[in-house]
Image: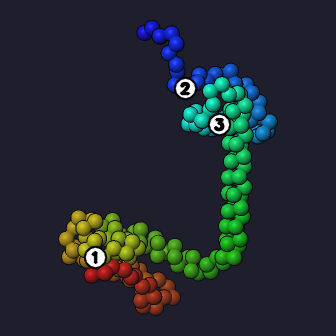
Amino acid sequence: MLRKQGMKRSMPRFDIIGQLGSLRRYAQSLTRDSADAEDLVHDALVRAYERRGTFRSGGNLRAWLLSIVHNAFVDRMRSRRSEAARIEQAGYVTDTATPAPQEHSVRLAQVREAFFNLPEEQRSALHLVAIEGLSYQQAANATGVPLGTLMSRIGRARAALRQMEDAAPGRGKNHLRIVGGEQ
C-alpha cells in the first residue's frame, strides 16, 4: 500500500526501543534491584501506552517516559507503605485476640471431623441450612431434591451428630446444638 505524501498521522511516532536503556537505568537507580526495575519499566510502558494520547506532539519523549517511570515508582512505594501499615494494624488486632482454650479447639476439631464423616447428601443439606442459612425450601431447590427428602437428610445428619455427641466421653446430652433452616 502506498502512502500519500503530506498525509498527517493522528498519533506521534513513539521510539520506545531507543528509550529503554534510559528507562532501565533510572528504574534500577530507583529500585536498587534488577527484577523490580524490569517490573517498574514494564508498568511504566503500559501506562505510557494507555496514556499515549496525553503526549504532546513535539514534546520530549524521553522526559515524558522517565516521569511515568518516576510516578509509577512513587505509586508503588505508597502502595507498599499503605500495605505495611494495614499489616501492622492487623498485627495489633491479632495480638489482642486470645486463642481458644485447648479443650474447645479439640472439641471443634472433633465436631468438624464428625461433620465431614457424614454422607455427602446429609453433609450438603446440613451445610446449606445450618451454615449458609438457607431455608429448607431454598436448600431443596439448590440440591434438586424434594423438600421432604431434604428434611429427612437433615434429620439423619443431626441425629448422627447427636449420637456422636452422646458417645463423646465426659459429655452430657444435647451439648452440641445444630441450628439453622427456616421452614
- Toward which corner of the image does residue 68 lie, by quadrant? top right
How many neighbours does mark 3 have within 10 angstroms: few (below 14), some (14-19), or many (20 or more)? many
Tag 1: amino acid: Tyr
Query: Is residue 134 or residue 16 the one in the foreground?
Result: 16
Compared to residue 141, the image places residue 13 above or below, namely above
Q: Residue furthest bottom?
A: 172
Q: Measured from the top left, where is residue 142 in percent x and y? A: 28, 65
Nearest-to-viewer mark from 3 and 1: 3
The kind of secondary structure element at disc 1 is helix
What is the distance, in whole Å, between disc 3 and disc 1 at their CAs?
54 Å
Residue to which mark 1 is pinned: 136
| Residue 44 disc label | 3
When the figure is inspected, residue 116 is found, relative to residue 105, above or below; the finding is above
Tell which circle, 2 or 3, labels the residue nearer the N-terminal end: 2
> Which one is earlier in the sequence, the residue at label 3 or at label 1?
3
Q: CB atoms at circles 2 and 1 under 8 Å apart? A: no
- Amino acid bearing label 2: Met
Q: Earlier in the sequence, mark 2 or mark 1?
A: 2
Q: Secondary structure at mark 3?
A: helix
Q: Which residue is mark 2?
A: 11
Q: Quadrant of residue 84?
A: bottom right
Cβ atoms under marks 3 and 1 closer than 8 Å = no
Within-10-Å neighbours for mark 2: few <14, some 14–19, many 20+ = few
Q: Are marks 2 and 3 in contact (CB under 8 Å)?
A: no
Chosen colour scheme: rainbow
**Residue 23 drawn above or below residue 116:** above
Instruction: Residue 126: tell me if it is visible.
Output: no
Image coords of residue 149 (percent x, y): 22, 73
SS at badge 2? loop
- Residue 52 in percent (x, y) is at 58, 33
Side (left or right) of 65 relative to 5: right
Q: Which mark is residue 147?
A: none
